[in-house]
């Protein structure tokens, strides 16, 4: 219920990481990167931070799984002995953290080879910290599946006094409901763009490398795009019947995307390689903004849940990756993506019906229970 579905739900993410690490980076690149990480205990905190972001994604999945209706039987977990409870949650998070353990073992082997004992100890402490936080979070939600969120005093003071413009509705909802997913996606995508631009200081590359980094960074925001789509078509479904011009609807969502992608845009503009002409910065930024528009248009073609949309995202990413390798200019990809996304958006917007509430697996289980 937790381990298998976690890897299925995030299959696109794992395939993307494997494709990037196995297809773009060579073996000695991995070794050089590992030696850089373990060179000092301070630098070891970089991979530990990435592991914590991975743990945030995992904890968010476990929390949502516990709160699903078909999993209410798991509430009986609290009647088990305390030792057995901890043994179960530690087992689950350990298997979910298997990719982290594998890379940590690789870093430890490199560190032991070079005699960097302090770095090895730091990695071990970091792994224990990640496992402990994940297990405590998991057990707490198993004991409090219907926890009532409290509204902060400052929120109660500001909410009646501040009028939000419509484009900020989506952002505020994501901040309130999926803050862990939002923070993890932003930090991951920001680090990818920062790391990609930093590679230009070590060797000579063309704009293809930066385009690939942009592609990976923006794809990490697929969950945010799905959340924006859910807010508009589930929580704000009545807006569809209002006499609002389609162009104004599109502009509102585009403003929301612009605000959500502002951190990546700032990092890219600030760290843009000096070896590349500035026109390439404009081109890759247009490519950056076109990908969410394309994905948002696809979401209106047919009602799909996250498990069903992730394979489409993966195939699109592979297609863009191949086109970039064959020297397709970023500005052309940006124009095609934006045009295709808006065309699909306009064609299916008024006929689209948002029905998805559960994954196919959850629907089948609910059907069996009702029978």
Image: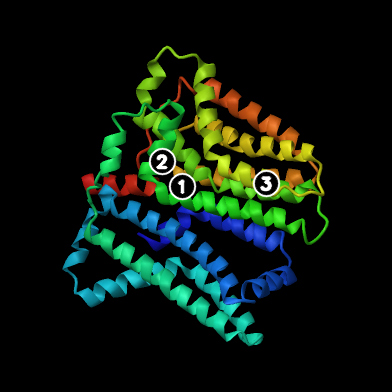
Q: Quadrant of residue 169?
A: top left
Q: How many marks?
A: 3
Q: Quadrant of residue 201?
A: bottom right
Q: On the image, numbered disc 2 is attached to which residue?
A: 174
- Given residues 256 and 341, the one toward you in this image is 256
Q: Earlier in the sequence, mark 2 or mark 3?
A: 2
Instruction: State left or right for residue 125 relative to residue 142.
Output: right
The x, y position of residue 72, in whole percent, is 23, 54
Quick check: marks 2 and 1 in contact, CB under 8 Å?
A: yes
> Going 19% across and 62% down the picture, which residue do you hit?
76
Is there any visible trace of residue 319 in the rendered image?
A: no
Instruction: State left or right for residue 138 relative to residue 353.
Output: left
The x, y position of residue 7, in whole percent, is 47, 59
The x, y position of residue 216, in whole percent, is 62, 50
Q: On the image, numbered disc 3 is attached to which residue?
A: 270
Q: Earlier in the sequence, mark 3 or mark 1?
A: 1
How busy is the neighbourhood of tag 2: few (under 14 within 10 Å), some, or many (20 plus)?
some
Looking at the rendered structure, the secondary structure element under dot 1 is helix
Q: On the image, numbered disc 1 is attached to which residue?
A: 182
The x, y position of residue 257, in whole percent, is 53, 34
Above or below, comparing residue 369 to residue 250 in the picture = below
Looking at the rendered structure, the secondary structure element under dot 3 is helix
């Amino acid at each position: 219920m937790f381990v298998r579905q976690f890897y299925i739900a995030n299959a696109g993410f794992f395939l993307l990481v494997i494709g990037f690490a196995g297809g773009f980076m060579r073996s000695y690149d991995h070794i050089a990167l590992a030696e850089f990480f373990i060179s000092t205990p301070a630098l070891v905190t970089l991979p530990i931070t990435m592991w914590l972001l991975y743990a945030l994604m995992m904890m968010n999945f476990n929390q949502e799984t516990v709160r699903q209706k078909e999993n209410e039987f798991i509430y009986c977990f609290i009647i088990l002995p305390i030792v057995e409870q901890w043994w179960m949650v530690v087992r689950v998070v350990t298997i979910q953290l298997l990719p982290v353990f594998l890379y940590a073992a690789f870093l430890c082997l490199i560190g032991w080879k070079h005699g960097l004992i302090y770095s090895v100890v730091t990695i071990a402490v970091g792994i224990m910290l990640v496992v402990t936080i994940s297990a405590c979070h998991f057990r707490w939600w198993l004991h409090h599946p219907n926890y009532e969120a409290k509204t902060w005093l400052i929120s109660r003071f500001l909410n009646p006094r501040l009028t939000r413009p419509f484009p900020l509705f989506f952002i505020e909802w994501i901040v309130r409901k999926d803050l862990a997913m939002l923070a993890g996606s932003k930090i991951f995508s920001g680090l990818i763009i920062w790391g990609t631009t930093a590679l230009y200081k070590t060797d000579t590359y063309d704009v293809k490398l930066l385009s690939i980094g942009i592609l990976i960074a923006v794809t990490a925001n697929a969950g945010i795009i799905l959340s924006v789509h859910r807010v508009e078509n589930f929580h704000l479904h009545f807006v569809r019947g209002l006499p609002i011009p389609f162009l104004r609807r599109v502009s509102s969502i585009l403003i929301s995307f612009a605000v959500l992608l502002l951190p990546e845009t700032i990092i890219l503009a600030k760290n843009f390689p000096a070896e590349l002409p500035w026109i390439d910065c404009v081109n890759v930024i247009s490519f950056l903004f076109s990908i969410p528009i394309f994905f948002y248009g696809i979401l209106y073609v047919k009602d799909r849940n996250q498990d069903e949309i992730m394979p489409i995202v993966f195939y699109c990413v592979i297609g863009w990756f191949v086109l970039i390798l064959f020297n397709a200019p970023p500005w052309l990809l940006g124009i095609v993506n934006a045009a295709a996304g808006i065309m699909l958006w306009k064609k299916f917007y008024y006929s689209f019906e948002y029905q998805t509430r559960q994954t196919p697996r959850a629907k089948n289980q609910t059907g069996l229970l009702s029978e």
